């Protein structure tokens, strides 16, 4: 259910996912919902087979992620690489290049702000 005040989503459900830049995404809050283009969130589903290998991504927004399942390696520009596994949380500033390597099939909950 979604209103101008809040959005409620029952559970993550891969069958509700749609194509994304890489992998698929199940939106909880689409960009622009509630008149807030800069805020969105959802579940990202990705496997190593869906990626071209390490991917350098420059964030178009601040991003906070929670790894629900799986394992990825992230390396923000100028920093050491860190592996994120189920239960890990990370936050990246807008405009910072981050190299992502998907090591196992992964489900990530993300918030762009």
Image (cartoon, rainbow, N blue to C red):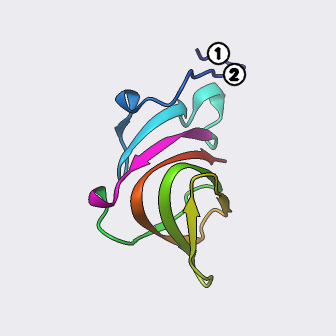
Looking at the picture, tell me which residue is in the foreground, 20 or 31.
20
Q: How many labels sit on residues?
A: 2
CB atoms of marks 1 and 2 within 8 Å: yes
Q: Residues within 10 Å of mark 1 (few under 14, many from 20)?
A: few
Task: Look at the numbered disc 2 and give the secondary structure of its residue.
Answer: loop
Residue 77 is situated, as x and y percent measured from the top left of the image, at 57, 80
Which residue is at a point 35% across and 54% down the rendered structure image? 47
Question: Where is residue 81 drawn, in percent x and y?
Answer: 56, 78
Looking at the rendered structure, the secondary structure element under dot 1 is loop
Q: How far apart are the two marked residues, 1 and 2, measured between alpha carbons? A: 5 Å
Q: Residue 60 in magenta?
A: no
Indicate the quadrant where residue 6 lies.
top right
* 82 left or right of 14 in image: right
Instruction: Identify the residue under disc 1.
Output: 3
Q: Read off the residue under disc 2.
A: 6
Q: Which mark is residue 63?
A: none
Q: Is residue 74 above or below residue 78?
A: above
Residue span colored magenta:
40-49
Q: Quadrant of the N terminus?
A: top right
Among the 4 quarters of the image, the one containing residue 14: top left
Which residue is pictured at 64% across the width and 57% down the height? 88
């Amino acid at each position: 259910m979604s209103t101008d005040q809040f959005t409620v989503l029952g559970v993550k459900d891969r069958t509700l996912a749609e194509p994304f830049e890489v992998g698929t995404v199940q939106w909880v809050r689409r960009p622009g919902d509630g008149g807030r283009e800069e805020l969105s969130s959802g579940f990202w589903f990705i496997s190593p087979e869906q990626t071209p290998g390490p991917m350098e991504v420059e964030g178009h927004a601040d991003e906070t992620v929670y790894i629900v399942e799986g394992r990825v390696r992230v390396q923000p520009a100028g920093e050491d690489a860190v592996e994120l596994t189920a239960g890990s949380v990370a936050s990246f500033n807008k405009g910072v290049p981050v190299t992502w390597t998907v090591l196992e099939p992964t489900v990530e909950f993300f918030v762009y702000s």
